Amino acid sequence: MGSESIIEEKKQGQALHTEQIKGNSKKLFIESYGCQMNMNDSEIVAAILAKEGFNTTQNLEDADLVLVNTCSIREKAEQTIRKRLQKYNAVKKINPTMKVGVLGCMAERLKEKFLEEEKIVDLVVGPDAYRDLPNLVEEVEAGRNAVNVILSKEETYGDVSPVRLNSNGVSAFVSITRGCDNMCTFCVVPFTRGRERSRDPQSILEEIRSMQEQNFKEITLLGQNVDSYLWYGGGLKKDFKNASEIAKATAVDYAQLLDMCATEFPKMRFRFATSNPQDMSLDVIHTMAKHKNICKYIHLPVQSGSNNMLKAMNRQHTREEYMKLVDNIFKIIPEMALSQDMIAGFCGETEQDHQDTLALMEYVKYDFGFMFAYSERPGTLAAKKMKDDVPADVKKRRLQEIINLQQEHALYRTQQHLGKIEEVLIEGVSKKSDKHYKGRNTQNTVIIFPKEHYKIGDFVNIKVEDCTSATLIGTAVGYSDNN
């Protein structure tokens, strides 16, 4: 991607690493692909294995145990994992005692089949089975293959303190829900991560407090669908209607949790991902408006601007309902930034359906976007009952038109920041210049500016002087009052 692209590349194949724990002699090499939830899950895995004598390493050749945390959202993601396993195989020929495990959504989808297809794999573990890793590692060290892909109705890992991997020391992820109940016909997530269950709010606050004590400045609350967060004492969200009256009266929903976090930690900045339009309450938007330390940015996937496609995708909202939600969001918080997920070429998509998508994009003018051509995922309702009938060249052309339009809108949005003074949290050094810092404003837009006397982790006010479609460029004018 060029520097002007607004498609945010997801972190791919990061060799995750942390500080060494004295006394631990075994070496763990762990890579994570896909979403932020996978990144956070890898931190949970590292914490569990640290108690079993493992330190992380960034050197694949030195590892006793190699784990790859996988994504199944698109076919390309799975192909990437297959190629990575070939690399592991080459190293294993040199280091035959090295064990290889596959974690995450791809492990859950393929299960024992992985052991048959990829002879190098010794260990297959689904997202809800990470607590069993010590037993499974013991099995493979004894020369036996090990598999645990059982989905749980209760597991949230709420009592596991994640090891922060490859951390910038400034921002961290905190998972608040797991699983998804929204059976979108194109999506494999409900089958790989199970039903929705929420985490005890007190354990969430305790983890954030721990992050504050370690001087982290920003927390991203994570879930497949954060808007569905609902704590009433434990259990699946679908069972809430059968809960006691006391449990219902004391239940905590997402707007309340967000308010609790922002109120208790006024010097920390909060973000969240991902939202679902059908579940988003305006109470959440009012809570965001109430607190300065809740960032004014929402990832609001729509997938298509066509009602025909939304119905085929089993999205529980219409085009009109989505547009009304967007109108209300901008009415309550005019400076809000929105980003989208968009699928080009879903089953049965006509040219008019595609034009409806472009028209919706013109209406919203998203700040960012994640855009992909449809790829059939085995096990989904679309794969079972719908024909993937849009030709590849048509998918490619429609996707490019979506990308081109998003680039125009992204530039339009960044230009709105010119001349303004905006608060930025310094996250690190610019990739292009060691004399410049990078950070993000409340709308999640990256800002580059000269270092001067500031340091990573500072909140500073930046005057925006120039921009591309993806980046703001400016100069620091002083510390913000959030330090």
Image (tube, rainbow, N blue to C red):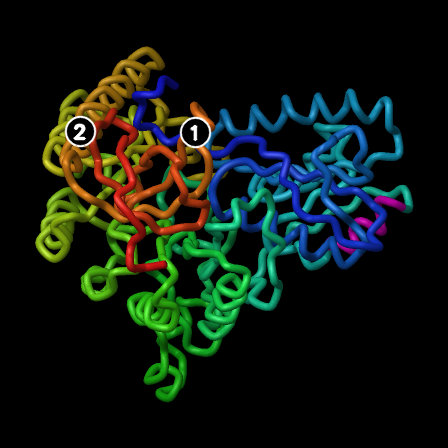
Q: Is residue 48 magenta?
A: no
The secondary element bearing badge 1 is classed as: loop
| Figure quadrant of the N terminus | top left
Residue at the disc numbered 1: 435
Name which residue type carries label 2: His
Answer few, some or many: residues within 10 Å of disc 1's Cα (few below 14, many 20 plus, some between 14 and 19): few
Residue 245 located left or right of residue 428: left
Magenta span of residues: 133-141
Q: Is residue 134 visible?
A: yes
Q: Is residue 139 magenta?
A: yes
Residue 388's disc is: none
Identify the mark at residue 409; answer none if there is no mark: 2
Tell me the kind of residue under disc 1: Lys
Front residue (pair 405, 248): 405
Q: Residue furthest top?
A: 393
Please tell me in which quadrant of the rendered image residue 238 appears: bottom left
Cα–Cα gap, marks 1 and 2:
30 Å
Residue beneath the point at 36% across and 57% down = 270
Percent position of residue 41, x then y: 57, 50
- Judged from the image, the secondary structure of the residue bearing numbered disc 2 is helix
Q: Are marks 1 and 2 in contact (CB under 8 Å)?
A: no
Q: Farthest residue in the right direction? A: 142
Q: Residue furthest front?
A: 453
Horizontal side of residue 122 vs 385, given as left or right: right
- Counting from the top left corner in percent of width and height, residue 184 is at 35, 44
Main SS, magenta residues: helix
- Dot placed on the residue nearer the N-terminal end, 1 or 2: 2
Q: Is residue 396 placed above or below 209 in the rendered structure?
A: above
Percent position of residue 255, x then y: 29, 67
440 vs 176, nearest the viewer:
440
